Amino acid sequence: MTSSISEAWTRIEVWLARHAPRTFAALGPPAERSAIAVAEQAVGQPFPEPLVESLLRHNGMGHYDLLPPFWSLLDVQSIINAWQTRMKIYGDELAGTEEGDPDGEYGPWWHGQWIPFAADGAGDYLIIDQRSYRRRGRIGKADHEIGCSFSHHPMCASLPALLGATATALESGEAVDGYLPVAVDEDELDWDF
């Protein structure tokens, strides 16, 4: 069973406060609903409810790793910037791109219905796939060099699944998808593999 966004965030916050206070302190304050509305207008679609709920809890977090193995949550303005940058880079390609199998392991290089919500600091993003098909809401990795891929790992089924799996890995100390949570210098979260 997938935990709710609120439940997963509570579990993550408790662990971070105790074991990685620097990462905990990096969590942004809640986003304003008006800022989310501006972002939705900028990307031309509503954000999925789990993303809205997460942004209302924490509006990004700077350059600290939270999600395995090295993903930092984007704030609302960074979501807009990332989406617009990808659209500028790949916009001309998008017009002639075939969709392929929307349930497949690989997607096109970029798609206008993907919403970036986390970054690795090297030009890659985690996205929520908002295309209309049966796996809508799954998490993909939009790599700036090789395009987008979708893992079949259960934590990539949705944002609630990803946050829930992260919380479970933190609490249990066990690896998730091969990545083990560790507290570096007893104040910052990192993931070993």
Image (spheres, rainbow, N blue to C red):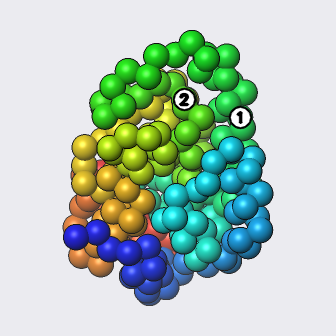
19 on left or right of 25: left
Q: Is residue 53 above or below residue 132?
A: below
The alpha-carbon separation of the residues under discs 2 and 1 comes to 11 Å
Q: Residue at x 72, y 38 (%)?
A: 84
> Is 67 positioned to the left or the right of 34 in the image?
left
Viewer-nearest residue: 47 or 156: 47
Residue at (45, 79) in percent of width and height: 6
Res. 104 image quadrant: top left
Neighbours of disc 1 within 10 Å: few (<14), some (14-19), many (20+): few
Residue at the spot x=72%, y=27% of the render?
88
Residue 143, horizontal then vertical, whole percent: 49, 33
- Residue, disc 2: 110
Residue 76 seen in render: yes
Q: On the image, numbered disc 1 is attached to which residue?
A: 85
Q: Secondary structure at mark 2?
A: loop
Q: What kind of residue is marked 2?
A: Trp
Which tag, 2 or 1, sits closer to the chain's start? 1
Residue displayed at 62% across by 74% down:
56
In the image, residue 126 lies at what x, y percent?
49, 46
Amino acid type shown at disc 1: Thr
- Res 181 visible: no
In the image, residue 77 sits, relative to residue 109, either above or below, namely: below
The secondary structure type at the circle numbered 1 is: helix
Pick out the residue farthest to the top: 96
